[in-house]
Image (tube, rainbow, N blue to C red):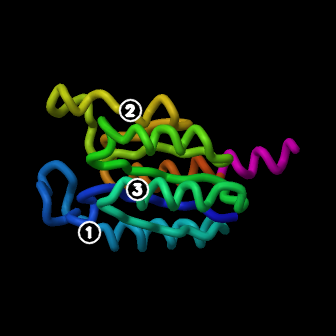
Amino acid sequence: MKILVVHGPNLNMLGIREPHIYGTMRLAGIDERLRALGDELGVEVETFQSNHEGAIVDLLQQRHATGLIGCILNPGGLTQYGVSVHDVIKAVDYPVVEVHLSNLHAREPWRTHSIISPAAKGLIQGLGWRGYEAALRVLVGEARDRQEYA
């Protein structure tokens, strides 16, 4: 079983950009924790970060029909405006869980609307880097349920 983790624009700046909001852990630390948890759960975790919407859309399209059990997506700055990301989520054959480090509803009013959420399986926000781990556990649990009840 394989899970894809996609980090959107500016997430490569974690630990540097506004640590009082996003925390001090760097992106490499989050990826490392996710791979370790994946090993515990018996799944392979592939991670990807891009500041470019097209690169994210291309990757999500490429993983369609490859047996991926799910994707964890932090769309970063594409949250409010990433129409093409929304559209590709609706087109692929695997579930996508949207994750945000901060609670968008506790921030600026313009951040509260996500164009991604209506296309996603679910949304986890405000739990810092632990939100990624929660999403990983959910996707693995649901994949196992599908296998068990198939």
Magenta region includes residue 149: yes
Q: Pointer 1: what residue?
A: 26
Q: Position of residue 141 (x, y in %)?
A: 66, 49
Name which residue type carries label 3. Answer: Gly
Which of discs 1 and 2 lies nearer the camera? The answer is 2
Name which residue type carries label 1. Answer: Arg
The dot on residue 54 is 3
The numbered mark, 1 or 2, whose residue comes first in the sequence reads 1
Q: Nearer the viewer, residue 113 or 129?
A: 113
Q: CA distance from mark 2 to mark 3?
A: 16 Å
Identify the residue at image location x=85%, y=42%: 149
Horizontally, residue 58 falls left or right of residue 11, namely: right
Q: Nearer the viewer, residue 16 or 66?
A: 66
Q: Pointer 2: what residue?
A: 115
Secondary structure at numbered mark 3 = helix
Relative height, residue 37 to residue 98 (above, below):
below
Identify the residue at image location x=61%, y=42%: 91
